[in-house]
Amino acid sequence: MSALPTGTVTLLFTDLEGSTGLIRQLGDRYGDLLHDHRRLMRHVVARHGGSEVDTAGDGNFIAFPTARDGVAAAVDAQRAMADHPWPAEAVVRVRMALHTGEPRLAEQGYHGLGVHLAARLCQSGRGGQILLSEATRAVIADDMPPGVSVVSLGERALKDFDRPQPVYEAVAAGVPEASAGPAAPRVV
């Protein structure tokens, strides 16, 4: 693992929506799809100065030294996913979420409530969305990446959090499936 940013960092979690269905649909070819997904993510992360913290299954955990870089990377990653020539029968959609905070650096990455908030926020989204915590929205409010706007989705109850969390969505041209509408309410 490369040196991870410390202090105030922006955490990005991603998850491939419907991966179990894709495995059933593609069989052995799913490995190629997953490889392409990871390659695209790593290319975008490197271009925006991020550090891969961990991968699990079809998800990614990435850290950025700034919220602006994290949001710009998520937008570019969604565009890369949309532009990639996936197998014709596969619908590949990735949900993403970012939270800015000061997680504790451990031997194997980060820990703390902020890490869990980012992960739960990601789980609450749907493929194509880039969700932001209140902290990330506040940090980028005056330093938005070009062409990106933010809309409020209201509050969501997230599993193991005592109070509903404000949720925002980053919207940008070329990011299909992004919408200002809320996902179906659910506690995750």
Image (cartoon, grey):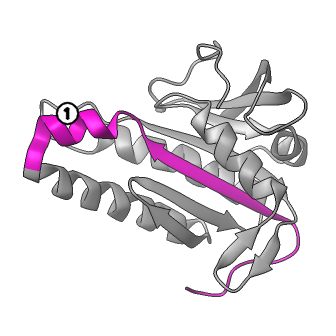
Instruction: Name the quadrant containing residue 169.
Output: top right
Crowding at mark 1 (Cα within 10 Å: few <14, some 14-19, many 20+): some
For residue 96: magenta? Answer: no
Q: Nearer the viewer, residue 24 or 121?
A: 24
Which residue is painted at 54% across and 24% down in the image? 178
For residue 19: magenta? Answer: yes
Q: Can you identify the residue that label 1 sits on?
A: 90
Q: Which residues are magenta?
A: 1-27
Residue at the extreme front of the image, as rendered: 160
Instruction: Name the quadrant containing residue 18.
Output: top left
Residue at the extreme left of the image, as rendered: 28
Which residue is painted at 60% across and 17% down in the image? 183
Q: Quadrant of the C terminus?
A: top right
Q: Nearer the viewer, residue 88 or 114?
A: 114
Residue 77, percent across and down? 47, 49
Mark 1 lies on a secondary structure that is loop
